[in-house]
Image: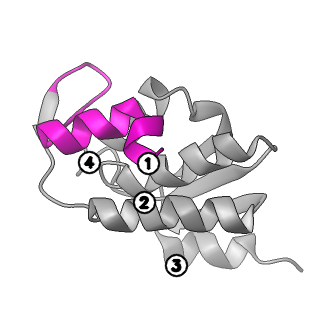
Amino acid sequence: MTLLDKNPVLREMVESHSAQDPAGVRHEVHSGIHVRCAEALYQAVLQRRPHLTVEVGMAFGWSTLAILTALQEIGTDGRLISIDPYQRASWHDCGIAAVERAGLAPRHRLIEQPDYLTLPGMLPD
């Protein structure tokens, strides 16, 4: 089974070239990673089985859904932190809405501030 078989929300976004915001309004997907890259990311997470992953930039959520789908499939307590200060302003919260629609929100945390402010605070002492 492919990533798109495992995540119907992502399949819908890919096939319709659109994403829903939390109110259900559709927005054209005008940028994002290629489906082959999302599949490769999904496979990499399955193989490496991380407990924590971090992504910089979330946009419409294609990579987010790929990572979270793999973490869900692994079955551990794996989590993803997405750093995107523009999720609301530029992306209409479509990435967050996709995560929620896919039922993957318990594994996800969005930090809405720049990566250069967030990442240094994530380093261990």
Q: Nearer the viewer's eye, disc 4 or disc 2?
A: 2
Mark 3 residue element = helix
Mark 4 residue element = loop
Residue 26 spot, x, y in % from top left: 14, 29
Residue that protrudes farthest toward the front in the picture: 1
Instruction: Confirm or deny contact between disc 2 and disc 1 (CB under 8 A).
Output: yes
Is residue 14 toward the left or the right of residue 72 in the image? Answer: left
Q: Which mark is residue 2?
A: 1
Q: CA distance from mark 1 to mark 4?
A: 32 Å
Mark 2 residue element = helix
Which residue is tagged 3?
116
Q: Which mark is residue 39?
A: 2
Residue 20 shown in magenta? yes
Mark 1 residue element = loop
Pointer 1: residues within 10 angstroms few (<14), some, or many (20+)? Answer: few
Q: Earlier in the sequence, mark 4 or mark 3?
A: 4
Is residue 94 toward the left or the right of residue 55 in the image? Answer: left
Residue at 17 percent of width and 24 percent of height = 25
Tell me, yes or no, if residue 86 can be seen here: yes
Q: CA distance from mark 4 to mark 3?
A: 19 Å
Is residue 104 toward the left or the right of residue 78 in the image? Answer: left
Kind of residue sitting beneath label 2: Glu
Q: CA distance from mark 4 to mark 2?
A: 28 Å
Residue 63 spot, x, y in % from top left: 42, 57
Q: Which mark is residue 89?
A: 4
